[in-house]
Image: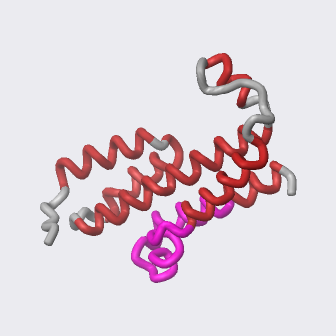
Amino acid sequence: MTADKIFSIANTVALLSWILLVFAPRWVGTRKLILSGAIPLLLAVAYFFLIVLFFGKADGGFDSLANVMKLFTNEWAVLAGWIHYLAFDLFVGIWEVKDAQSRNISHWFVIPCLILTFLLGPIGFLLYSILRFFLAKEVKND
């Protein structure tokens, strides 16, 4: 399978997951497939195989910005990096939805956070954290 094909599949799976998080967070399918963490785990498995098969075959490394830039001239390294982003951003989005539900924060307030988490990762997480600070009700850990 080509890197482009894997990229397309991973993007489609992630996009469909985000659509369900935004528009149907309480639907049984969303709970079973997305909120359970199954999709980020699937992406993690893809990432694992890409790292096992291609890590070390690309020039560069993580010790300097110049070497990171070299690393990301290899399509397989870029694909692994992209799937890394997809998995972790989706994981954060899932946490936002589950946390908001447990704290009785209206999903309408969470939607902009999810969109920003999908598009700009840490900015969406920052917005949700601010929202959570101001709107969250105390959760009792029994």
How does the figure colour the protein chain or chains?
secondary structure
Relative to 20, does residue 124 appear above or below in the rendering? above
52 drawn magenta: no
Nearer to me, 115 or 41: 41
Tell me what residue is drawn at x 47 percent, y 43 percent.
Answer: 121
Residue 70's spot in the image, x, y percent?
Answer: 73, 23
Outermost residue toward the bottom in this view: 28
Tell me what residue is drawn at x 70 percent, y 46 percent.
Answer: 51
Residue 32's spot in the image, x, y percent?
Answer: 49, 78
Boundaries of the magenta span: 12-38
Image quarter in which the C terminus is found: bottom left
Q: Quadrant of residue 123?
A: top left
Tell me what residue is drawn at x 43 percent, y 40 percent.
Answer: 122
Q: Residue 87 vs residue 48: left or right?
A: left
Relative to 69, does residue 87 appear above or below in the rendering? below
24 drawn magenta: yes
Relative to 122, does residue 135 appear above or below in the rendering? below
Q: Main secondary structure of the magenta part?
A: helix
Relative to 121, does residue 142 appear above or below in the rendering? below
Nearer to me, 140 or 98: 140
Tell me what residue is drawn at x 19 percent, y 48 percent.
Answer: 133
Residue 110's spot in the image, x, y percent?
Answer: 35, 57
Q: Residue 101 vs residue 87: left or right?
A: left
Image quarter in which the N terminus is found: bottom right
Residue 64's spot in the image, x, y percent?
Answer: 60, 18
Q: Residue 27 vs residue 79: left or right?
A: left
Q: How many marks?
A: 0
